[in-house]
Image (cartoon, rainbow, N blue to C red):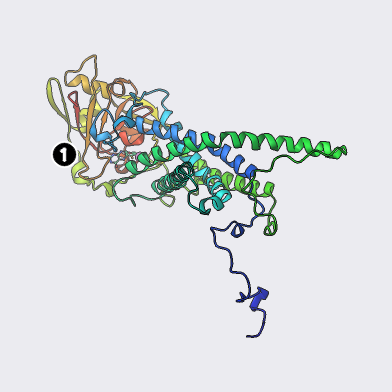
């Protein structure tokens, strides 16, 4: 065989050349960018970021009031993992808008950091032998849970905000249990790596001092070099970018994701900056009902025949029995206004809308619960779907801003926003703001 150069000038592989290294060999990973400081810096960002994600995620679960009714609980087998649940408050009214907006926006923003961190340690994940000792084996298993759990949480989270149900079963149990596995491994990892990170960050500063000393002409003895993340010395690949450049690249990616996501928490021109918003194509239109719609009436299978003035009745049951109210009767009850947002678990939210309707506690009073409104079970006209019904806690019923809304922004509710009547509760996740309400049962949950 002749020694012709291969097309494009890349030398062809020849039999007398050494076999190309496998990913299990340190020689395979030749980027000179890898190094303990780079990894430590990204690790520190994730330490703060992932902790906030975990806490806001747990808070998001509590906001559903899962211990109130099995209907609100998407992970009924949680056992002691529900130890921290509490009655979700109604103040401040933008509470869920904030916590869930932070959860989703931060999660999206951290994607480049997570990927860069994984890239920076990827040689370790392939290292052989798989385990040198029992302790080493345990450490590698915890790493597997860490990397697997981290990717799983980010992937399921992104899928849930971008697409409807692509999950076998439900998103909630996957993301909830995945979060506990991931965070447990994360906590172990952070504790094990804390000393190394502290040392590396300190050395970052000492490095600067050292340079200053060298400029003065004094030569310092070399510090102990324990950085096995650095590519093997004899033949690192050519740098395509400096370490600082790589950090800017990661930070820039994060910034770009942030800038194209954060607008999901606002109405108007800001929302148009949210290029990564879910339902990105669907324009909610303009006018009083022109704010984000989650599921449309058509999607939920709601027909005008059932919402018609003659057909629709609100059935309210409580201590003293059941009353049936037409929409015209409801509209003659004392009406009140509240300025409240819709804030979805997907992280998007609307600015405050002006809702007008009957107070939930006035409806409770109609059926015999006069001064101590109890919990309420709300059912809609919808026959299928996870969010067709929901339970509200007594504190939510009692709040004077909680309404069964008939109007929004001075107009009748549109079909897609829940006509003839929908629930709005301050600080509650969107899922508890049931649309197309048909039945409300007070007490006895
Ligand atoms: N009956 C019914 N009500 C519902 C839902 C639903 O699917 N069915 N979706 C809920 C969810 S998840 C959200 S975020 C809000 C969205 O309200 P909007 O479409 O008016 O913005 O409605 C809630 N009410
Ligand atoms: Mo939602």
| 8 horizontally vs 99: left or right | right
Q: Residues within 10 Å of mark 1 (few under 14, many from 20)?
A: few
Farthest-out residue, left: 321
Q: Which residue matches tag 1? A: 310
Name the secondary structure under disc 1.
Answer: loop
Residue at image point 42% right, 28% down: 95
**Figure quadrant of residue 290:** top left
Residue 216 place in picture, x, y as percent: 87, 37
Q: Which quadrant is the C terminus positioned in?
A: top left
72 displayed left or right of 288? left
Q: Is residue 351 visible?
A: no
Q: Specify the quadrant of the image occupied by residue 170.
A: top left
Q: Residue furthest right?
A: 217
In the displayed image of the protein, which residue is found farthest to the top?
371
- Asked whether 403 or 275 is in front, the reply is 275
Residue at image position (50%, 41%) is: 263
Side of 198 where 277 appears, left or right: left
Residue 9's x, y, as percent? 68, 75
Ligand 2 position by quadrant: top left
Q: Identify the residue at horizontal 25%, vertical 38% (top origin).
A: 436
- Counting from the top left corner in percent of width and height, residue 420 is at 25, 37
Residue furthest out toward the front: 133
Residue lying at 67% horizontally and 82% vertically, measured from the top left: 3
Instruction: Give the answer, above or below, for where 93 lies relative to 418.
Output: above
Q: Nearer the viewer, residue 358 or 429?
A: 429
Q: Is mark 1 within 8 Å of ligand 1?
A: no
Q: Give x and y (percent) for residue 87.
A: 33, 23
Which residue is nearer to you in this view: 202 or 108? 202
- Quadrant containing the N terminus in the rendered view: bottom right
Q: Is residue 166 above or below residue 341?
A: below
Seen in the picture, residue 211 relative to 66 is either above or below; the reply is: below
Q: Quick check: can you spot residue 420?
A: yes
């Amino acid at each position: 065989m002749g020694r012709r150069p291969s097309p494009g000038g890349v030398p062809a592989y020849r039999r007398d050349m050494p076999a190309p290294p496998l990913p299990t060999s340190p020689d395979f990973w030749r980027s000179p960018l890898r190094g303990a400081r780079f990894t430590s810096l990204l690790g520190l960002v994730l330490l703060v970021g992932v902790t906030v994600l975990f806490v806001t995620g747990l808070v998001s679960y509590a906001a559903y009031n899962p211990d109130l009714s099995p209907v609100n609980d998407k992970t009924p087998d949680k056992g002691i993992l529900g130890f921290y649940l509490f009655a979700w408050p109604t103040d401040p009214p933008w509470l869920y808008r904030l916590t869930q907006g932070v959860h989703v926006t931060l999660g999206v923003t951290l994607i480049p950091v997570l990927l860069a961190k994984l890239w920076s340690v990827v040689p370790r994940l392939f290292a052989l032998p798989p385990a040198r000792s029992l302790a080493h084996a345990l450490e590698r298993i915890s790493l597997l849970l860490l990397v697997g759990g981290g990717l799983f949480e980010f992937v399921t989270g992104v899928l849930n905000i971008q697409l409807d149900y692509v999950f076998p079963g439900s998103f909630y149990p996957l993301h909830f249990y995945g979060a506990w596995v991931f965070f447990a491994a994360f906590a172990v990892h952070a504790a094990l790596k804390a000393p190394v990170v502290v040392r590396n960050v300190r050395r970052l500063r000492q490095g600067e001092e050292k340079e200053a000393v060298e400029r003065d002409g004094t030569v310092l003895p070399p510090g102990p070099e324990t950085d096995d993340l650095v590519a093997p010395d004899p033949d690192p690949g050519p740098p395509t970018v400096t370490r600082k450049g790589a950090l800017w690249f990661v930070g820039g990616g994060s910034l770009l994701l942030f800038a194209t996501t954060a607008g999901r928490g606002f109405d108007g021109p800001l929302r148009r900056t949210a290029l990564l918003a879910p339902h990105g194509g669907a324009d909610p239109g303009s006018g009083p009902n022109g704010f984000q719609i989650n599921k449309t009436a058509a999607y939920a299978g709601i027909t005008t025949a059932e919402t018609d003035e003659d057909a629709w009745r609100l059935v309210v049951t409580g201590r003293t029995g059941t009353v049936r109210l037409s929409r015209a009767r409801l509209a003659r009850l004392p009406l009140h206004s509240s300025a409240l947002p819709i804030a979805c678990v997907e992280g998007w939210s609307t600015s405050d809308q002006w809702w007008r309707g009957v107070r939930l506690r006035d409806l409770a009073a109609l059926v015999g619960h006069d001064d101590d409104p109890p919990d309420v079970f709300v059912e809609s006209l919808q026959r299928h779907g996870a969010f067709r019904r929901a339970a509200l806690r007594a504190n939510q019923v009692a709040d004077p801003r909680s309404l069964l809304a008939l109007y929004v922004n001075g107009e009748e509710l549109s079909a897609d926003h829940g006509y003839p009547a929908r629930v709005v509760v301050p600080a509650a996740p969107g899922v508890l703001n049931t649309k197309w309400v048909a039945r409300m049962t007070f007490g006895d949950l």
